[in-house]
Image: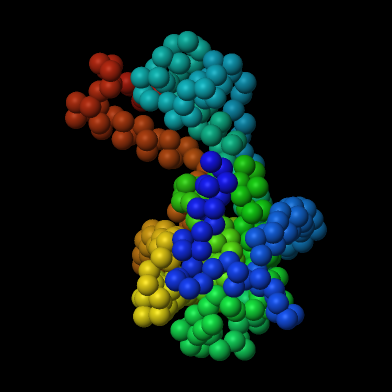
Amino acid sequence: MLSRLSELLWADWLWFPEGHGWNDLKDHDGIVFPKPQDLWATFPIAICFLVIRQIFERTVAKPLASLLGVSDKQRVQAPPNPILESHFSSTSKHPSQSSIERLSKQTGCSVRQVQRWFRRRRNQERPSKLKKFREASWRFTFYLLAFFAGLATLIDKPWFYDMKLMWENFPKMPLLPCQYWYYMIELGFYLSLVFSVASDIKRKDFKEQIIHHAATIFLLCFSWLVNYIRGGTLIMLVHDASDYLMESAKMFNYAGWRKTCNFIFVLFAAVFIVTRLIILPFWIMHTTWVYPLTLYPPFFGFYFFNGLMIVLLCLHIFWAGLILRMVIKFLPGNGIVEDERSDKDETESEDEDNDRERRERSKNGHVQNGHTPLNNNRSKTD
């Protein structure tokens, strides 16, 4: 049963066009082709990245943050309260109005004090500005180096200028040393991001980021297995072209360099839209989806590869929407770019605004669970 399933899984007709198969990827006469076992090298590379990242953040990113004036404001700690802590940990970090009333009675605190406690407790769990800067500087460094390494790998290749040549002699295209290392390092880095997902800053698009990492890893692994190497290197270069700009904009944002941040962000938005919404779909995907049909009949591997490309394209469209929203927000008022995916510390004024909104809803009859509207006109010293 298992042997038959394995034979079906690795059948030539699934992954290659008619007349081609795995035998085409056997080394001969000094010509080397990608092999499945090569991908095991990405795991030690990922571990090396995790170690290098810790060293980099301590010895490079931290002093750089101090040099640029990145500092964290002192956060007021929420006082110990077992009842409120239990609700925060096991029920909700954002309690409803009725829950706040109940907790107020249980703890003997005023409603305002309960609201303040939850606000301060949420702020305690938000990552510090220094942590955000260190993470952004690490990613900036990698993406910048990866982009220029990819450019050096592809600049002298004919398929960089005529993408149809990525199918020339497919799948009997020899593996070049520069392609091998470009793939292994990129895959190792994305694996390291998956390994560190528990400790990295969780943004509002956390689920989309996980989907993106998974789709990218599957895409690169699959393109390696069936020797879509030329297309894979082009896809990696297009992605790295804008990522380092976004990370550098974040770095200057955390440092408070308003004009520099805004300028880099506009540049990032332009590069992102050109590379991921124009070059990727209309040049690269056209060459991986439309052009191959003039050479071969469609096969499962063709649909699988382009299906992953569509997943990435959908995520790019989603992020392009967020990027344009941020551009629209800061351009008219000449404000500083705020990453909409990040949480910001809550302040006293924000809490008072929330109270005002609740009172307005209560006046309009939106009273939850039959509770009467609260009289929040208490002294601010509660």
Q: In this picture, is 250 found above or below 33? A: above
Can residue 11 be seen? Answer: yes
Task: Please identify the residue farthest to the left as the structure is shown.
Answer: 364
Residue 246, above or below 168: above
Is 292 on the left-hand or right-hand side of 152?
left
Residue ID at (62%, 21%): 80
> What is the x, y in percent for residue 98?
36, 19
- Could you say where residue 342 lies in the image, as x and y percent from the top left? 50, 50
* Residue 3 relative to residue 318: left or right: right
Which one is nearer the viewer's eye here, 336 or 90? 90
Q: How many marks?
A: 0
Front position in the image: 281 or 169: 169
Is residue 165 rendered to the left or right of residue 35? left
> Which quadrant holds residue 365?
top left
Residue shown at 61%/46% (left/top)? Answer: 197
Figure colour scheme:
rainbow
Relative to residue 319, is residue 51 drawn left or right?
Answer: right
Q: Is residue 238 visible?
A: no
Picture quadrant where residue 354 is located: top left
Report the residue at 65% width, 47% height from top: 195
Position of residue 351 relative to residue 369, above or below, is below
Q: Residue at x 58, y 78 (%)?
A: 172
Q: Position of residue 42 (x, y in %)?
A: 70, 58
- Picture coordinates of residue 346, whole percent (x, y): 49, 40
